Image (tube, rainbow, N blue to C red):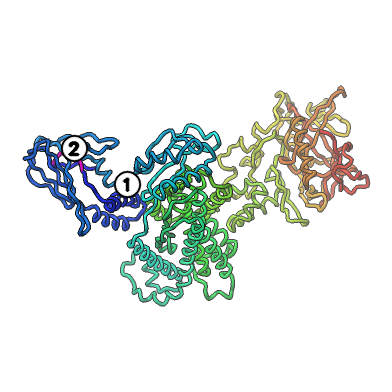
Amino acid sequence: MGTLTSCSFSAVNFRFRPNSMFRQRIGVQVFESRKLRRNLCFLCRGIISKELSREKSFKVSCISNGNNNDGDYSNNDGDIKGNDNHNASSKESTVTTASPPGETVPEERSTSNDPPPSVSSRPPNIAPLGSAYSDFQIDSFKLMELLGPEKVDPSDVKLIKDKLFGYSTFWVTKEEPFGELGEGILFLGNLRGNREDVFAKLQTQLAEIMGDKYNLFMVEEPNSEAPDPRGGPRVSFGLLRKEVSEPGPTSLWQYVIALLLFLLTIGSSVELGIASQINRLPPEVVKYFTDPNAIEPPDMELLYPFVESALPLAYGVLGVLLFHEVGHFLAAFPKKVKLSIPFFIPNITLGSFGAITQFKSILPDRSTQVDVSLAGPFAGAALSFSMFVVGLLLSSNPDAAGDLVQVPSMLFQGSLLLGLISRATLGYAAMHAATVSIHPLVIAGWCGLTTTAFNLLPVGCLDGGRAVQGAFGKGALVGFGLTAYTLLGLGVIGGPLSLPWGFYVLICQRTPEKPCLNDVTEVGTWRKTAVTVAILLVVLTLLPVWDELAEELALVLPWLTDGELATIFMTCKTLHRLARPITHHRSLDASRSFEKFPIPFYNSVDHFPYAYFIYTPFQVIPSSTRQFWGPNDLPCQFGPNSSDADFPLSREGNGEMNKPESSLVSLVDESGCECEACEKVSEDNVIGCPCMELDAAEGMGIMSECGPSCGCGSECGNRVSQGGIRVKLKIVRDVRKGWCLHAAQSIQQGQFICEYAGELLTTQEARKRQQIYDKLASKGNFSSALLVVREHLPSRKACFRINIDTTRVGNVARFINHSCDGGNLSTVLVRSSGALLPRLCFFASKDIEEDEELTFSYGEDRVRPNGLKCFCNSSLCFGTLPSENT
């Protein structure tokens, strides 16, 4: 309500006695127009406003009690006249309405004895604007009652409470206004049975009592503090008049607008077909549409020869729209849901943005809302995807070369899902040229799928918004809608069409759908799953892909496991191209450049190029880190948000191994030799370096070496096992054994081979892991590499146990297989001065020839008679691998 600046008003009662026809035309239509205005475009709003202005034309004459205003105040709708000859007791208001010819509307006067009609509340009086004007106030609530919606008759409410509700169905405890403007009644109370059964019974009884005058809604109780004891939310029942709750019929002007929009959509579809032939168009036409500096338009008659060849693409776009709408109508017809005519939205980029199709009847339940909402997009997507796939197949068919059109390859960067399918079909080389030759069906299918994806966004009363509202409720739609608006605004989805589509939705489709008659009963699980899958496909379709993004992914690929990298291989051509050199690099060196010589993989047996594990050249504590394993020329050697503590296995710039404190076995003390050049016996035959004492043990040698606290440097000869692997090795794939470690050069007896490096475990953890490994080995091809070393103490009454697991983290020693005859390697426990734990190292027990497999004995105990088979092929083979209880 506005305030007039030329006068002030005191209380005036607008009283007139309209007939039923006028009341319907004025009251109901005005209310419906208000609601329709929020859902219609500006053209429809203008048309409805003009019609309503003719219907609501009336004249108001008011006689004020003031005597300061002489003259007439008039406008187009009526006249307001002041007369100072009337006193305060003579108040009169007349209302003259536009009546049909031959019909007379009587004038009615109000006297002081007539009580004013009751209203729920009255606004405060408007203060006078000056002494020159008298107090004059309009009862705005009376005017709203005059022009507002038809409310529920109080006598009907009493009748419904007495005959409809009861102890066996729903016990009413409270009444509240219901509807957008409070034109209905909401009955709150306690449910006395199954909600679906009670609602069906109430609907039947309401039809018997009141006929088709009212609609009954079952909704969740607002501000409910606790759920229903029978499960689910508490429910209430709302009552609205049919003419208020149901949408109005389609007007003639709406049919005209729909026809005009359809003709414009045909034109935009033909324009899309012409634009797809850009390589055939005259240069002046192409320049005008592509050069922003071009001002003078070309002769449009030059485009006429290309219209006929553009029709197949236009037919495809229009066919998708037709299938979409037919899907809606086929799903709505069995449920007796009425739909409006479709208002197609033309778009020169996609041919069309789809159509606006309104529900012309109230939906019975949320399941119907989901079914009708998804039927159209699914039908349109089915036809679009069929055309898209057939077009891709025809694009690679030489017989269809004459029908192909040239399009920029950047087109396929607009959709992650469709781009990957296109690249997998047409090939990487074809997709990365400047232009791509494709069949027009590919463009029609692409545009149809993109349009369908846009309409499935969970926003407002789009198909996706209706489906989400029906499947998950209006609250979930708010969250989904905010997310969709954010992604569109940031351009994350939709590419260059994100902003135009966002504005279109905000103007025409932002309002959620009205509640269903049964707005409480949830849909089934499969409907929720279908909606979820549809939203996921929408994101994949509207999410663009850039080669730059794929190139950035190359920084992540070296940190992936073999299974993860294999999945990337099958994703798209770009990532396949980036992952291939990583796989090749991994097959060239198992040591990740930690060792002096690369240790390559050789496989002529199957398709496994390498064995994945985390490499460590020394003993480490268990951790759950990843490790970089890829070409050294990649710009990053560490993963995102990583640090040296996160990835302890790396190398310094000078090639020396970096060993953070977290990965080293802690020292007992700082004791060590002070030798400058360590020798076992000095020149005067006196015992030399104390670190070079060598003792023998049962089946295993023990060697002492200088440690970190010794005075000698890294060139000390008593640090044989601390310089890493100094011989050339290779890993070869065997049919029965799997991966095996072989010598890539001749090795002399006594020469150091490698250390058995891996994770140091407690006995409890070792037993737990071994149980897991045994289960995995019993189910399939799995081989563990957990080694238990026992060092007997001098008292012979106890032993020192070390558990080293190289199954996931280790070095090439994990590939050394067992030989029942002892093999060609000997195991030696090496103690470094000051170190707490010894290290298990391998030395050549005899001369080893090039290409000979390196083996040693896992032990003599065999507690599992039916253990893993042994394939050492030695003359002393037991047939099974050694085993013991951990």
Q: Which residue is mark 1?
A: 149
Q: Position of residue 625 (x, y in %)?
A: 64, 39
Which one is nearer the viewer's eye here, 268 or 169?
A: 169
Q: CA distance from mark 2 to mark 1?
A: 23 Å
Secondary-structure class at tag 2:
strand
Quarter that holds the C terminus: top right
- Residue under the image location 59 percent in, 58 percent down: 573
Return the residue found at the far right: 875
Q: Position of residue 729 (x, y in %)?
A: 77, 48
- Residue under the image location 86 percent in, 46 percent down: 869
Relative to 659, say whether 582 is above or below: below
Q: Does residue 413 appear anywhere in the picture? A: no
- Quarter where residue 666 is shown: top right
Which one is nearer the viewer's eye here, 402 or 82?
A: 82
- Quarter where residue 66 is shown: top left
Return the residue found at the far bottom: 305
**What's the residue type where badge 1 is placed?**
Pro
In the displayed structure image, the side of residue 318 where residue 41 appears, left or right: left
In the displayed structure image, the side of residue 583 where residue 312 appears, left or right: left
Q: Residues within 10 Å of mark 1 (few under 14, many from 20)?
A: many
Quarter that holds the N terminus: top left
Mark closer to the chain start, 2 or 1: 2
The answer to whether the residue labelled 2 contacts the one labelled 1, judged by CB atoms less than 8 Å apart, is: no
Relative to 366, say whether 793 is above or below: above
- Quarter where residue 344 is shown: bottom left
Magenta span dominant secondary structure:
loop
The disc placed on residue 11 is 2
Which one is nearer the viewer's eye here, 571 or 432?
A: 571
Q: Does residue 350 appear anywhere in the picture? A: yes
**What's the residue type where badge 2 is placed?**
Ala
What segment carries the magenta color? 7-14
